[in-house]
Every structure is written in C-alpha cells, then in structure tokens.
Image (cartoon, grey):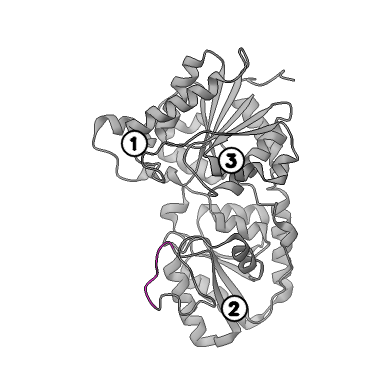
Amino acid sequence: MILVVEMTVSGTGHVPGNSHLIQMIALALPEQPVRVHGEAVHVRELSRDPDLAALGRITFHEAPLSPHFEGRPHIVSPRRFAHEFRTLLRLLRAVPAGEPCLLVLASATSTAVVAAVLAARLAGRRVGIQVGLHGNLNSIVRPRPRNPLRRALDLRAVLGRRLPGVRYLAFEHCIRRRTAELIPAVAPRIDSIPLAVNVSELAAWQDAPLGEPVRVGLVGLATEAKGITPFLETARLFRERYGERVEFLIVGGSPGAPPPGMFRDIAHEVQARHVPREVFIERLRGLHYVFLPLHPSYYELSPSGGLLDAVTWLKPVIATRIPLVEDLFAEAGDIGHLCGSVAEMQEALHGILATMDAGRHARQAAALRAAREGRTPRALAGAYRDIVRNGFGGLLDGRR
C-alpha cells in the first residue's frame, strides 16, 4: 500500500506537479494500490486528471489541512503538529492490518515529518516515510526560531536528525548535493530525481520557429527570486533599441497589485496573482525564448517551474549560470544560452536579434525534446522504483 498525502497545499496549487509525482509512483510500483489524500479541492482536481485515471489502482480521499499558518510551512506550530499527527495516525490505521505501507508526504512541514514518525510507531505496522522537498527547503538557510522547542522542530533540525524509517526526496540532483553540503548528517538519507515535465497539455503544443517579433518570456509569478527586476530592465533597454522587433511577456502574473507603469514594456496587461491556465498556455506556446535570471539565493534549494516549462514546451533558454541550469545544459547539450550575469544574458539576446539564426533555434528545441523524453513520469519510473527498493529495504517487495 502507498499513501500519498499533500500536507501543505490546497486548491489547484501543485496539482500538475502532484499528478506527475503520483503517476511516477504508480508506474514504478504498479502492483501497489495508491491512496491519495489532501484538501477537498486539491484531490478533486487530481481525480479529474485523465492520466491518473488511466493508471487504475489510485483512489482519492479528503484529508483537511491544518487551519494554522496555511501557506507558511516554514513556521513551527505546535497546534499544526497536533493536527498533522491526528490526520496521519487516522490514515495509517485505515491501511489493512499487517500490510506494509509507504507513506509519501508530497509536501510537508518539519512538524509533519515528526508527526509521521510518531503516527507510524502507534499504527503498529511497518511504514516507510518519504518526504518530498520543495521550495520550503530554503528555510534551512534562513534565521532560525529563538524558542528552543520551535528550534528543535524546525526543518534544519529535523533534517539533521536520524528519524527511523524516514528518507527525503529532492526534485533535482543539484538540490540533493547542496542540501547534503549544508547539512552533512542528511546525506545518507536523501535521494533525488529530476522534476517530471507536464505532458498532459502537449496536445496544445505548436512549433514556434524563430521570427520577428522575437518573443521573450519570464515564466511564472513575477518575483524577485525569478528575476523580475532584471527582466523588466532588459525589456526597457531592448524596446528602446529594437522597437517592434522584440516583445517581452510574463507567462504568469504579479504577486500583488503592481505600481503604475511597472509593466509598461510588457506586451500585454499583467494581472495580479495567477492567470487562468489557458492564458498561461497561450503565452507560453508563442514564446521563442524563456528568460531566466534566476537568483541563486532561492534556486539553489528549489526546483524551477519556469525551467521545467521551457523543457516541456521546447523553448530555448537564456539563463543565469546556477547549478540547476548547469545540470540541465550538461544533460541536454545546446538548449540555449548559459550566462554568467544578466549583462551576458543581454549580450546573448543582442546576438540572437543580430543573427536571427533559425537553424540553431530549431536545433536547441530538438535538444529540449530529447531532454523532455527523459523526464516524463514513465521515463522516471525505473529510477524511482530503485530509490524505493534501495532506500526502504524491500518494504513493498512481494506484494501482489
């Protein structure tokens, strides 16, 4: 039996990512029934995913999230811990008697990890606990709580402690390496697998041969970590010099209400928060390049949805040289322009507009296609199966 529990995200957030995770799990261990638990809207959206429905042996169940500090998983909350413990104990006790169980926390707070260990002990069965690490991993490099109890339960402390039956899963190899550098004690207990691409919407894909206007996009919410300030400065400089030969788009929205004139050089109106998915896809589909001035202070410990969208939609990238991007270039070859600074990114874009080399652009898209094929849930299933079998000592072997 496999339980997949989403402990921190409600609504439609992370639905594509969790769908890919569940697909990978189900494809890797097809003999195992999979029970998916999460907030009501979240599991309803997952249950409507035809790629999940086609796999069978997957059921969906509501498990209300804690109302305490929703959306702030880095905060250590005793009340949230109590809620997490009750929830996980109830789910584990519902597993048929004597059946071993892999409990996958798709995302989790640090207290949920401790709650899972205690619940597994009280459930009276063999349980392996796998914890997905996402952007909240950045809390290990932020100021820690002063309160001794909260400090003992924050993510840095939990990762550094050897908890029985617990292993962690980072969604890029460089994130595993960096986490192990920062917290050496976690190195023997952390695995990694590439973040899977979103293949469910590829029927909407269309080729976008290089031509004018050259469309350059920042993908996702317009945040500083994603590089919105250098992106907007680049848009201003290039619109002044090249005019209608180049367009800049934000494939997403603004985190809040933007000040007047902030997006004057963007080719469309930028709305607050997330845009409808159909708008997101339409903008992304028409891009020629994804512009990624990613800030290492965040993306050393977090996968980039924008980078993954570039792979999914075969959009060559112009990106800063951080481990996440370097690893992808090493894996896939010439998929764009790997740059040491924003100034180098701008020079690369000048070169693109000067040469308009449609042949190279097409070759870069072809290299991205090959990388995409290696990052589907089906392609990653074998590696995930090895992670479970090697990390959890034959926990699920022999189940038919």
Mark 2, secondary structure of its residue:
helix
Between discs 1 and 2, the one toward the N terminus: 1
> Based on the displayed image, in which of its 4 quarters is residue 141 positioned?
top left
Residue holding disc 2? 351
**CA separation, marks 1 and 2?**
49 Å
Disc 3 and disc 2 in contact, CB within 8 angstroms: no
Bounds of the magenta segment: 255-260
> Based on the displayed image, in which of its 4 quarters is residue 153 positioned?
top left
Residue holding disc 1? 76
Q: Nearer the viewer, mark 3 or mark 1?
A: 3
Residue at (33, 46) in percent of width and height: 142
**CA separation, marks 3 and 2?**
46 Å
Say above or below: 85 vs 71.
above
Position of 257 compared to 265: left or right?
Answer: left
Amino acid at circle 1: Val
Q: Is residue 258 magenta?
A: yes
Say above or below: 10 vs 4.
below
Quarter of the image for the N terminus: give it: top right
Residue 377 coordinates in the image, percent (x, y): 69, 43
Tag 3: Cα neighbours inside 10 Å, few (<14), some, or many (≥20)?
Answer: many
Q: Nearer the viewer, mark 1 or mark 2?
A: 1
Mark 1, secondary structure of its residue:
loop
Residue at (45, 73) in percent of width and height: 232
Residue 124 coordinates in the image, percent (x, y): 52, 12
Say above or below: 314 vs 266.
above
Task: Mark yes or no: residue 316 visible.
Answer: no
Disc 1 and disc 2 in contact, CB within 8 angstroms: no
Residue at (50, 56) in percent of width and height: 322
Instruction: Please tell me the numbered disc located at residue 43.
Output: 3
**CA separation, marks 3 and 1?**
25 Å
Between discs 3 and 2, the one toward the N terminus: 3
